[in-house]
Image: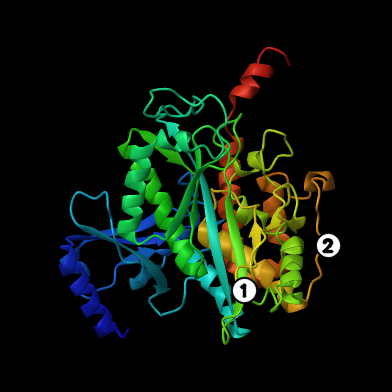
Amino acid sequence: MADEESGQWLRNWFNEHGITEVECVVPDITGEPKGKIMPAAKYLGGERPRLPDSIFIQAATGDYPENEEEIVDPAELDMELIADLSTCRRVPWAREPTAQIVHECRYLNDDPVLVSPRHVLKRVLDLYAARGLKPVVAPEMEFYLVQRNTDADYPLQPPTGRTGRREVSRRAYSIEAVNEFDPVFEAMYDYCELQGLDIDTLIHEEGSGQMEINFEHGDPLELADQIFYFKRTLREVALAHNMYGTFMAKPMAEEPGSAMHLHQSVCDLETGENVFADEQNEATSDFHHFIGGLQHYLPEGLALLAPNVNSYRRLLPDPGNVSAPINTEWGYDNRTVGLRVPHSDRKAKRVENRIAGADVNPYLAIALSLACGYVGLSQKMAPRPSVASSAYDSGYRLPSDLGRALDTLEESETIKSLLGERFINTYVAVKRTEALAHFKVISSWEREYLLLRV
């Protein structure tokens, strides 16, 4: 739509829904919503809202990297926020009729903001488009419902459901375990429907209070926007029911971690056909090359799939980490591998990346995974043989903590060329700031085992 047409569409939409306020939202490095709240009338006045580009170098702790002047102009340049009207949604939990709109960011000279996560994903999608290809993704998001916890020194606990009792055993796929929280999920589905989020099935996962929601397959940018909205929605719904919803990768020590499983396929832009399978539904060379790229480069980019110090607790080679992969082996219908290929028809032939945690920024995780597959396609990279037995026997082949993962990412010229050198340098600096803040905290384990013994 032209600007005039866009403005008229937005006015009509605001009038239809009685919108009085607008949340101008920008996903930051961690995936948290940043932005401005404006009166609807002022927003429609035509002046674009602005934010400083420093929002993209703020760590989860609120701190900034010590070398911030090396990665962002110390003047904190203004960015204009440009609405993506395809993301225009009602805010279901707002008291007053409120719209939320995800915005692109551009500098006042019209240059793109290279460190914006949404820009990074669009950059990767442009690579595919230049080859006449279009990726398709279908994410699965795991999360926990937990009892409200206002003191961070205390471990999390599963919440009480309608029976007034907490789960004390793992109840994977239990319908009754889901029914314990029917009011939460009824509200969640209502909110998602109001926002046009294409969620599909809901199941109870392995952990106590752990659930999984599946999204319909579609355009990667649209699905990243939907995950961004869904995380916010789930947290709001849980709060309204006196509990927390969390996407931490490993929120409880004795429970399994939470993942974002990402199903990926690639279609020919001209024909719409899935390039991963031929007419007989046999795997093509493109399918194998895509896997080859994932196997080779995902370990180099692991810091984007496991972005927090907590993420690596989920990926430990530990029997308690149910279904969490420890390498990039691949296999058919094998949940021990990092890259699973479900049985499917030709149209749905796909590769499921099981490495990413639920704590990822969805734009960056999808960008990294598709970028690795793209290199495999471009360079015709052969994968290792598929694994039919337990992939755990192949050993741990991933960086074991955030520090090592950041070192590996910083050294990867391939990933820098795909996602942008400035973005990678910024991301590494932000995440090292978080890792340092974590290292400064003295844990209860240290007090328990070292206080009186060393």
Residue type at mark 2: give it. Answer: Arg
Q: Is residue 284 left or right of residue 440?
A: right
Whole-percent x, y for residue 403 in the image: 68, 47
Whole-percent x, y for residue 350 in the image: 64, 65
The residue nearer to you, when weighing 350 against 176, is: 176
Proximity of marks 1 and 2: CB atoms separated by less than 8 Å: no
Picture quarter with the N terminus = bottom left
Residue type at mark 1: give it. Answer: Val
Which residue appears at 58% of the width and 48% of the height?
A: 259
Which residue is the site of mark 1? 266
Whole-percent x, y for residue 93 in the image: 27, 49
Which residue appears at 22% of the width and 68% of the height?
A: 43
Whole-percent x, y for residue 448 in the image: 64, 17
The residue nearer to you, when weighing 265 against 302, is: 265
Which residue appears at 49% of the width and 34% of the height?
A: 209
The crowding category of the residue bearing disc 2, from other C-alpha atoms within 10 Å (few below 14, some 14 to 19, many at least 20), is: some
- Residue 171 is drawn in which quadrant? top right
The residue nearer to you, when weighing 241 against 22, is: 241
Q: Is residue 232 left or right of residue 136?
A: left
- Residue 70 is drawn in which quadrant? bottom right
Element type at mark 2: loop
The residue nearer to you, when weighing 6 against 215, is: 215
Element type at mark 1: strand
Q: Is residue 201 above or below residue 44?
A: above
Which residue appears at 69% of the width and 79% of the height?
A: 279
Q: Is residue 84 visible?
A: no
Q: Is residue 94 above or below residue 144?
A: below
Of pointers 1 and 2, the one earlier in the residue sequence = 1
Which residue is the site of mark 2? 384
Picture quarter with the C terminus = top right
